[in-house]
Image (cartoon, rainbow, N blue to C red):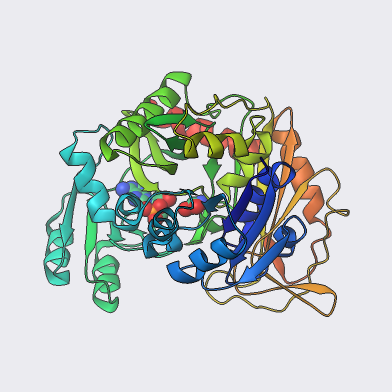
Amino acid sequence: MTEIVLLVGGGGREHAIARALADDCVLYNCAGNRNPGIAALAEDCEILDATDPEAVTSYAREIEATLAVIGPEAPLEAGVVDALDDAGIYAFGPRREQARIETDKAFQRDFLDEHEIPGNPDFETFEDIERACAYIEAYDGNLAVKPAGLTGGKGVRVVGDQLTAEEAKAYLRDSEYDRVVLEERLVGEEFTIQALVANGEFRASPAVQDHKRAYEGDRGPNTGGMGSYSDTTRELPFMTDGEYEEAVSILEATVDALEDYKGILYGQFMLTPDGPKVVEFNARFGDPEAMNILPVLETLLLNVLVGAREGEALPDLEFAEQATVCKYAVPDGYPEDPAAGTAIGIDPESAGDALLFYASVEERDGGIYTTTSRAIAVVGLADTIADAEGIADEALSVAGEGLRVRHDIGTPELVRARIDHMAELRE
Ligand code: AMP
Ligand code: GLY
């Protein structure tokens, strides 16, 4: 039987999902924007509000979808999966209640605590901003300040890294956050593990390291992620296989405690000298991290989705032993004051050996232009991280004026700095 799959969402991550599925099914897409990369792979792209459960469900019915897969977090929070499931269309993604593991950071911390899952830092939750400020004042050490709700990866401030305790209090007082989590600042190297989950089963993928800071050398404000790399092995160069396994077991324990979770569970970890600690969970693939993992996934993603729907055992995941480097090109001024409307001078042909993924772009008058968010990503695949970096960076050399790239991501210098940083912390 030919599966008719509805992919919800229109960013770089969803382009990578579309690429992983398109050859094996009839693919449809719906999102608030038209992604030219997805449009080239799908039968049709419907522009709609992806956080409107009724609009998504009615489109899914219209195309007679046999499966749905949800890319971003906002539709999960809005209950799009609940609506599709209730309409008899199996959606690979958690229902709203289970997506709280991402959408409510206070719930996330309490949940780990309650189920005695290792890797949770010390934390407190506040509904009164003045009480939170008093806690910052009295705390012996540095804290991470987190709004409890979704902020697109841009709401967290880390005392001792990005700001002082005084500035953190001012940040909270100026904000309109009504619930915040204050937690122990974790120091180490960050990494991501993404797992596919259904029917009580769990399949982990290789670790990836994202780069959240806007500028080279990890300076500047946090972004949605400027680029990321993975190695030929499941672990990254600064961690041991045992540390990778430890993080996987934290994810697995979380899945067990969540009961009936389905979709992707994304663990963001800080590798510390005491092992991996949980920075956060997401209820979806990472963006950019999906672009590292899906191109090396040799198992058909469609078979995972069908197995999940049929209540069967999920297939084991096979990954090509290739390193990947993903780099985003973003508009000048991103994330604070992005300049939209720049023509993008790169296309799938000029990308050479790299894969090209479209994110926030606008197609008009035969050209493709930036909007105010991350525009395009390229991914290099090779036998080493350094070679994959070379392929990705070369592809971006024709991206054009008005776009900014972190050339340092995946370079031997930066990878070496990560290894040295971890070695120093372990001393
Ligand atoms: P989040 O939105 O929770 O992913 O946080 C964004 C970024 O803030 C993370 O990728 C980390 O770099 C940083 N961060 C979050 N929580 C902590 C923590 N407890 N200690 C240190 N850094 C953190
Ligand atoms: N790259 C981080 C995220 O997708 O949340």
Relative horizontal placement of residue 77, taking residue 5 as reference (left or right): left
Query: Which corner quadrant of the image does residue 279 belong to?
Result: top left
Which quarter of the rendered picture does the C terminus lie within?
top left
Query: Where is residue 87 shown, x and y percent of the image?
Result: 43, 58
Query: Which corner quadrant of the image does residue 397 belong to?
Result: bottom right
Q: Is residue 33 above or below residue 150?
A: below
Query: Where is residue 31 shown, x and y percent of the image?
Result: 58, 67
Query: 165 and 344: which one is in front?
Result: 344
Query: 307 and 49: which one is in front?
Result: 307
Q: Residue at x 57, y 72 (%)?
A: 32
Which quarter of the rendered picture does the N terminus lie within?
top right
Relative horizontal placement of residue 117, taking residue 231 as reference (left or right): left
Q: Is residue 259 above or below residue 89?
A: above
Query: 317 and 160: which one is in front?
Result: 317
How many marks do you count on the picture?
A: 0
Q: Residue at x 13, y 59 (%)?
A: 135
Q: Is residue 411 visible?
A: no
Q: Residue furthest top?
A: 242
Q: Residue at x 51, y 47 (%)?
A: 285
Q: Is residue 377 above or below residue 207?
A: below
Q: Is residue 425 visible?
A: yes
Q: Residue at x 13, y 71 (%)?
A: 130
Query: Where is residue 49 shown, x and y percent of the image?
Result: 51, 73
Query: Where is residue 53 shown, x and y percent of the image?
Result: 44, 67
Query: 36 and 289: which one is in front?
Result: 36
